[in-house]
Image: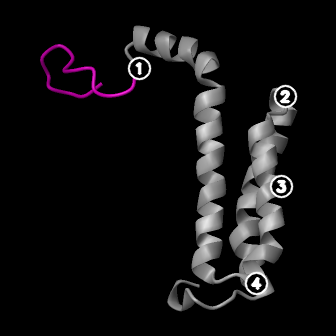
Amino acid sequence: MLAHVGSDMDWVAALGFCGGSTAYLLTYVALRLRVARTLRRGPFTASVAFALLVPVAVVVPGLLALALVAVVWLVLHAYELIWWREERAPARLVGIGRGRGVGITGPSAGDGAIQ
């Protein structure tokens, strides 16, 4: 696809390109539903959007199909960051309290190791 960014994709390439993201997210949704018994709207909605992009990817140039897939991923990540910010805050504070925060916490006992 990257060699011919101006040409349309065939069905197999479009299914692999958009359907791969659909399969990944639906697997995530199914695993979360089985383990936590919850269904979050973001990943499920994004998987439906990827499935709907398969026929679109067949008729638009490859570079535009790549841009559309990237936009769906970016919107999903923005949704997750904004919508679930408060729910992640306690987990971040607990992790920092145990020394497992994000980033480098400094050397431990003077050995120069990164924790």
Q: Mark 2 belongs to which amino acid?
A: Thr
Along the viewing direction, whichever of 41 and 104 lies nearer the viewer: 41
User: How far across and down, in percent of the image, does residue 36 sit?
Assistant: 81, 26
> Which residue is at 68% across, 88% downward?
8
- Circle 1 residue: 100
Q: Is residue 9 magenta?
A: no
C-alpha separation, residue under disc 4 versus residue under disc 1 = 48 Å
Q: Determine the secondary structure under disc 3.
A: helix
| CB under 8 Å between discs 4 and 1 | no
Determine whether, in the image, residue 69 is placed left or right of residue 52: left
Q: Secondary structure at mark 1?
A: loop
Q: Nearer the viewer, mark 2 or mark 4?
A: 4
Residue numbers of the magenta segment: 101-115
Give the Cα separation between the discs numbered 3 and 2.
18 Å
Q: Horizontal and vertical percent for residue 56?
A: 78, 75
Instruction: Provide the residue designation for mark 2.
Output: 38
